């Protein structure tokens, strides 16, 4: 089976201008937009000046989490991971970071804040984490369902019937299904659709398992191929 490894990240960063001198900004980090159709996320941070502040600065670090991962991983992206400074004498500072061409996964930004005196000394620091932007996998996802079967007249062959569904977000083109070592072909399977695949293969016995392989030739680019090779209980009594 073919396993497709997505690109880590291709990003284009668009930076918003700092807020004007009259802005009173709360200390906050936010996910302001998340689009699966355009594969983008927009994160913003805001901070108020404190006593003695001459300039302020923000740093955005993009973190990602894949399906089944328990930890967040920092992504190295050009333009991120560095402090962006405000103009002098502002009462607040607002900064927006837009990230494009995101691969499937979960994304968030960790925003760090700094306040500086006229001499450049740091007088305060803070950190906030934004909400999470989920980018779903757009590919097809084949799933094997219930296996049925009946014994044919020769007593050594069974007619197996397997439910196969596409739970992904794209249509699947032609692919093979192998049941008990015998293959047949499905012409296509639309997203959200289910079909029944039938083959005649050597009979199984109660208590045994029947081996099933979906798309053994790797013709379909799938979101998750972990369930393409499964075992089902023998359906013959």
Image: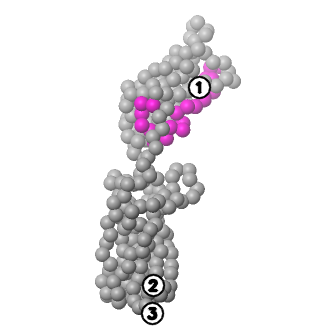
User: Is residue 163 in view from this perspective?
Assistant: no
Question: Spatial distance from mark 2 to mark 3, Cα to Cα?
Answer: 10 Å
Q: Which element type, helix, strand or loop, lies under badge 2?
A: strand
Q: Nearer the viewer, residue 132 or 74?
A: 74
Mark nearest the camera among 2 and 3 is 2
The local crowd at label 3, few if under 14, some if 14 to 19, many if 20 or more residues have their Cα within 10 Å, is: few
Q: Position of residue 149 (x, y in %)?
A: 56, 20
Mark 2 and mark 3 lie on one chain; the one further toward the N terminus is 3
On the image, which quarter does residue 59 sit in? bottom left
Residue reaching furthest to the front: 119
The local crowd at label 1, few if under 14, some if 14 to 19, many if 20 or more residues have their Cα within 10 Å, is: some
- Residue 210 to residue 62: above or below: above
The residue stretch that appears in magenta: 218-237
Mark nearest the camera among 1 and 3 is 3
Question: Spatial distance from mark 1 to mark 2, Cα to Cα?
Answer: 63 Å
- Check disc 2 and report the residue beneath it: 115
Mark 1 and mark 3 lie on one chain; the one further toward the N terminus is 3
């Amino acid at each position: 089976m073919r396993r497709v490894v997505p690109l880590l990240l291709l990003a284009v960063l668009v930076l918003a201008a700092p807020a004007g001198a009259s802005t009173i900004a709360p200390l906050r980090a936010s996910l302001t937009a998340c689009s699966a159709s355009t594969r983008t996320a927009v994160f913003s941070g805001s901070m108020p000046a404190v006593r003695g502040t001459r300039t302020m600065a923000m740093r955005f670090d993009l973190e990602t989490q894949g399906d089944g991962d328990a930890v967040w991983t920092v992504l190295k992206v050009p333009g991120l991971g560095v402090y962006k400074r405000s103009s002098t004498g502002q009462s607040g500072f607002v900064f927006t970071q837009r990230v494009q061409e995101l691969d499937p996964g979960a994304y968030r930004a960790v925003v760090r804040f700094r306040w500086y005196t006229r001499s450049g000394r740091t007088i305060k620091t803070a950190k906030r984490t934004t909400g999470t932007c989920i980018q779903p996998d757009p590919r097809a996802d084949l799933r094997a369902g219930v296996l049925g079967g009946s014994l044919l007249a020769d007593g050594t062959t069974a007619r197996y019937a397997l439910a196969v569904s596409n739970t992904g977000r794209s249509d699947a083109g032609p692919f093979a299904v192998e049941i008990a070592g015998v293959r047949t072909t499905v012409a296509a399977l639309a997203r959200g659709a289910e079909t029944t695949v039938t083959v005649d293969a050597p009979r199984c016995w109660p208590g045994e398992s029947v081996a099933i392989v979906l798309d053994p030739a790797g013709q379909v680019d799938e979101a998750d191929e972990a369930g393409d090779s499964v075992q089902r209980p023998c359906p013959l009594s």
